[in-house]
Amino acid sequence: MMLGLLAWVCGLVFVAPVAWMVLTSFHSETDAATSTPSFFAPLTLDGYNTFFDTNPWPPLMNSLSASVGSTLLVLLLAVPAAYALSIKKVEKWSDVLFFFLTTKMLPVVAGLLPIYLVAQYTGMLDNISFLVVLYTSMNLPIAVWLMRSFLAEVPKEIMEAAALDGAGLAVTIRRVVAPVAMPGIAATSLICFIFSWNELLFARVLTGVVAGTAPVYLTGFVTSQGYFLAKVCAAAVVVSLPVLVAGFAAQDKLVQGLSLGAVK
């Protein structure tokens, strides 16, 4: 009983800021700026009208292209790599996993200047393709670690049966391993998509007018004229919707994938 009550309290604590953001997005700027929050202020769509009047579709499509493109590339690279590290283990596979982990220990800011110079010298500044490659390299270590734990739970008997039937490596991965590990693939895809969609620092520095993403566009609502809370909340709600929709759509497979291998 007490644990259940505690779980509900923790859930409400995490949901309360999001609920308050959604409610504020339907208030006028005057009501949103009151020092004492007004729960029963009149509702209006002015914040959303202002947001869509600014034509947010190019940055939203840029974020969608970078997130989906990088996620697909990550899966194409992570699944074979995880297969080699979990099923057909290569020599010193633990050292390889440790190397992947060390790449995430470098502070993001430390790599900002070198990556900017590379983008500048290659003429890839303000280019969505460069973000796709960058997000792929950022999410690949996490994806390999996740997929290795998922693929390690695939029964080896079905792969041996596929080998006896004459299936090659590509066919085994595509038609035998992938369907069994689909919950893990879905969980990995969703995590990589969320990380790519929410990334701000590199997108802020490496993009401009052409390839600006949704988080960069969102920061543009904080201007020297003031902090318009209702408009910012409306923009934040719209920018957050793709991640929420993807999370709800893959909810079952996400839970199943993240719990895969937790118990024997």
Image (tube, rainbow, N blue to C red):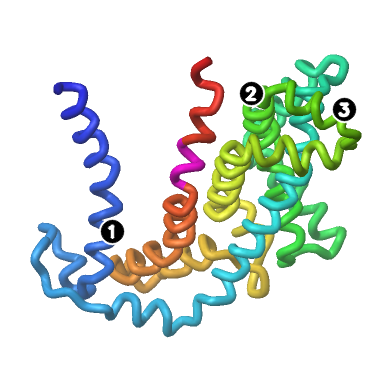
Left or right of 239, for residue 167: right
Magenta span includes 157: no
Tell which of 102 and 145 is nearer to you: 145
Where is residue 169 shown, x and y percent of the image? 87, 36
Left or right of 228, for residue 8: left
Where is residue 102 shown, x and y percent of the image? 70, 25
Instruction: Look at discs 2 and 1 and give the one toward the viewer.
Output: 2
Mark 2 or mark 1: whose residue is earlier in sequence: 1
Q: CA distance from mark 2 to mark 1?
A: 41 Å
Query: Residue shown at 34%/76% (left/top)?
Result: 48
Residue denoted by label 2: 153
Query: Residue shown at 49%/41% (left/top)?
Result: 254
Residue denoted by label 3: 164
Residue denoted by label 1: 21
Magenta residues, as a range?
251-255
Disc 2 marks a residue whose amino acid type is Glu
- Quadrant assignment, res 224: bottom left
Where is residue 68 shown, x and y percent of the image? 64, 58
Disc 3 marks a residue whose amino acid type is Leu
Left or right of 186, for residue 164: right
Helix, strand or loop for disc 3:
helix
- Quadrant assignment, res 240: bottom left
Instruction: Look at discs 1 and 3 and give the one toward the viewer.
Output: 3
Disc 1 marks a residue whose amino acid type is Met
